[in-house]
Amino acid sequence: MDVELHDDLDGQVALVTGATRGIGAQIAAELVDLGATVYAGARDPADVGAADQRTIELDVTDDAEIEATVERIVAETGRLDVLVNNAGIGGPSEPLHAASTAGIDATLATNLRGPTVLTKHALPFLLDADGGRVVTVSSGMGALAEGMDGGSPAYRISKAGVNGLTVYLDGEYGSDGLLANAASPGWVRTDMGGSEATRSVAAGADTPVWLARFAPGNPGGRFWRDRATVEW
Ligand SMILES: NC(=O)c1ccc[n+]([C@@H]2O[C@H](COP(=O)([O-])OP(=O)(O)OC[C@H]3O[C@@H](n4cnc5c(N)ncnc54)[C@H](OP(=O)(O)O)[C@@H]3O)[C@@H](O)[C@H]2O)c1
């Protein structure tokens, strides 16, 4: 699919959740390289090693921190162009009947409610931007088209949920210029993916960073993998 990309993100502001390690740290670093002012969301800001990012305390399950994050970014920069919903946990791996309720709650709170509430608070500023982007790091495990078995019920449901969030955002705000897309990074060698995973962190971050470069008028409301659309 032909898309138009920002050559650089000079003058633009991005927020990346879960930027302490793994795919989120890579996305944040690459957005800095593109020229963006990057706010690196972290439960513990001391865990962000990059000196060229603005660390911000953000547990995506904490509503007060969500609100304070958006307020601080707008107070300091007057804008927000890109929101990358990356933070996530794997949650209970057992099939649903054996999964702990606390684990289900934590997974849905982190992976689904968090991005939904954070996006809600970021929306007014993303809509003020020319072609504001919401990039949500989803998963093939949330793809309805692939069928679902093999455990991790809350994780799968949460990722199907953020795919729904992406379609919703496009339906509600796409005509106002918002570009909301979801990406499946593949199986990536991170703490979550494990050392046996087939893809590097850079490969996992590639499509989310590419989506963050989408220029106004590009497609939204789609699910992407390796820079190509895939079925929900
Ligand atoms: N790795 C894969 O194979 C794979 C495949 C498909 C999709 N994904 C998705 O890719 C994204 C990143 O995964 P990853 O592999 O990079 O995982 P990771 O290495 O385990 O990193 C997870 C990140 O999320 C943060 N996080 C967890 N709970 C949080 C919360 N409540 N508030 C804010 N941040 C929180 C962690 O912060 P702390 O350092 O504070 O814990 C960490 O920065 C996730 O959405 C995941 O579902 C990964």
Image: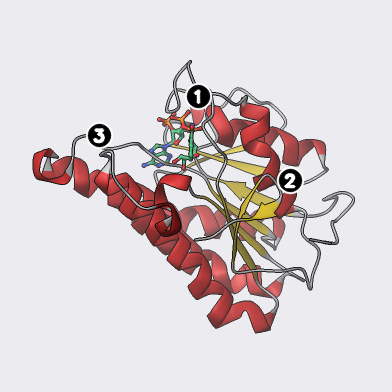
| Mark 1 C-beta to ligand 1 under 8 Å | yes
Quarter placement of the N terminus? bottom right
Residue 64 visible within the image: no
Residue 24 visible within the image: yes
Tell me residue 48's x, y (percent). Answer: 56, 27
- Identified by mark 1, the residue type is Thr
Q: Residue at x 67, y 32 (%)?
A: 203
Label 3 vs label 1, nearer the camera: 3
Q: Which mark is residue 190?
A: 1
Label 2 vs label 1, nearer the camera: 1
Tell me residue 4's x, y (percent). Answer: 86, 61
- Badge 3: few (under 14), some or many (20 or more) residues near its Cα, within 10 Å? some
- Identified by mark 2, the residue type is Thr
Instruction: Identify the residue at the far right of this view.
Output: 7
Q: Secondary structure at mark 3?
A: loop
Q: CA distance from mark 2 to mark 1?
A: 25 Å
Q: Which residue is mark 2?
A: 37
- Identified by mark 3, the residue type is Ser
Q: Which mark is residue 93?
A: 3
